Amino acid sequence: MNIFSGAREFTRLRELIGILLKYGFDDLVRWLGVEKRAGWLGRWLSKELPPEIRRQPTEERLRLALEEMGPTFVKLGQILATRVDLLPPEWIAQLEELQDQAAALPFSQLRGQLEKSLGAKISDCFREVDEKPVGVASMAQVHRAITHNGDEVVLKIRKPGIELKIEDDLRLMLQLAEIAEAQSPEMRKYRPVEIMQEFERSLTRELDFSIEARNADRIRDNLRGIDYVKVPRIYWDWTCNDLNVQEYIRGIPAKKINELDRAGLDRKQIARRGARIVWKMMLEDGFFHADPHPGNFIILPGNRIGMLDFGMVGRLTPTRRDQLIRLIRCVIMQEPEAATMVLVEWASGRYVNREALNSEVANLLERFEGVELADLDVTALLNDVAAILRAHSVRLPTDITLLVKACITLEGFGRMIDPEFQLMEEATPLLRKTLVNRYSPRVFAKAMRTRALDVVEKIYNPSPGLLGAHVEGSGGSNVPYFDPDDLEKLVNRMEKASHRQTRAILLASLFVVSGLMIQAEGVTRAVGILSLLSCTTYWLWMLASIWWTERGHRS
């Protein structure tokens, strides 16, 4: 495999190898087999590391190397910091400290691209633009501006040429991942090529600032019923893939604790509200801010919270949220077999030794025995689950890893604002509500109807060889055969069974309501007694109907 397809890539590879050798990763360079083609850099392999580098732990040296390698590798490290299923806690802690730092570009170097993105001269769109940046990262630079209407906005401008550099790095990293996967059975278990492809998709989305803007719009819409949160408005007339123009939110950065105190703000309430917002996004909306660190929160008067930076978001489908709720229920109810089934579903078809997995899950659940829902440490639980799956060479689903990352970051933010902050305090009401809704008669009836329709659909569109007799068809192929009359009878029976189940659920609900009404006084109690008598009569009629139906089938 030729990983040196051009002079630019060769030069970049030599630069990366030099950084790896500088921080003591000569074994990795040898293992990849690229030191011979790195020219004079190969001579570094025999050099002694400086004492200050040699004393640093491996994970810290990796963080420093990634920061020096540039934006693509910083982003890779930040993505890996979410993979609690791949890396141990001490590595995660170091990668979480990665800083996306870069020198500011003169505004004159951004002017041409900004006007191209705007499709007009800067003076035609803005009354004033501050040429001094308020934020600088490796991929973008942020400047304040004022529109001709007097609105204060910020311009997030993608740096010229950064896309090409990231594309080169991604191509090189993918080729190195292919080498690692081909050479090492141990690495193959973690599917580095798949991780790199996933990272490429994530970084490509992050390069498109219009996606971040749409994320902000969606989250603002989901949180519109909460009056103490503010998400900046997007100015879509100017926003595009390399420019994000959004409302400027004036307030106190959440990390400036002393300023919050001087402003007389209630830090306990701020921490609780921040947690309530993020839990709502995760458990109710299924679309959440995946990086809720203090730098992404602005505190406004009245203990209101402004949210920023929606480049990293997580999505939890209804199925995934249902799995998470099932897992929490299994922990509270001490049901290891059911919890194991959730982890098997998360394995996405990869082989796991179910007996060994069940034994480890049972040991895990024992550590949470007797814990109330309000005291359950979800972050610790999911970290332990990730460790179990890591031992079985199974990766957590990406959306769950982002959830874990968000929980860890949110807990750190809450503790910084309020040392007595409890992460689950605001989650408990939502979890209880979700659990109640999941097992409500309405949801149960809907699930039963859906399952009945699924069975009917399989009858109409069966898999070959699973149902029915087989007869010779044209060309000598076997096709399933059904008698149309028998099929119609079967469908009718299943539909009647579904209707009967629905009526039974409604009848049970009426029994409960009638019992509650009987506890009251006056007319309500009389109505409750009449309702209970009616329900009892209908229940006896249903039993007789079922008995008569079964008697007819037996005869």
Image (cartoon, helix red, strand yellow):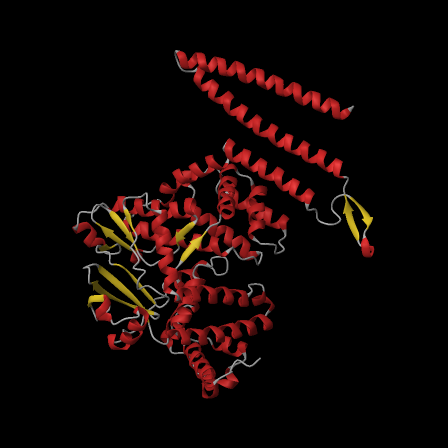
Residue 415 vs residue 491: left or right?
left
Q: Residue at x 44, y 55 (%)?
A: 402
**Can residue 447 be seen?**
yes
Q: Which is more toward the observer, 198 or 543? A: 543
Vertical relation: 10 (above or below) 530: below
Q: Quadrant of residue 392?
A: bottom right
Q: Which is more toward the observer, 521 or 112? A: 112
The image quadrant where one finds the C terminus is top right
Provide residue 104's location: percent of width, then percent of height: 27, 73
Provide residue 484's location: percent of width, then percent of height: 75, 39
Q: Residue furthest bottom?
A: 40
Vertical relation: 187 (above or below) 226: below
Q: Residue at x 20, y 68 (%)?
A: 130
Residue 196 vs residue 117: left or right?
right
The image quadrant where one finds the N terminus is bottom right
**Can residue 60 be seen?**
no
Q: Residue at x 44, y 52 (%)?
A: 403
Q: Residue at x 43, y 61 (%)?
A: 81
Provide residue 245's location: percent of width, then percent of height: 29, 62
How many numbered marks, from 0 up?
A: 0
Provide residue 323's location: percent of width, then percent of height: 52, 45
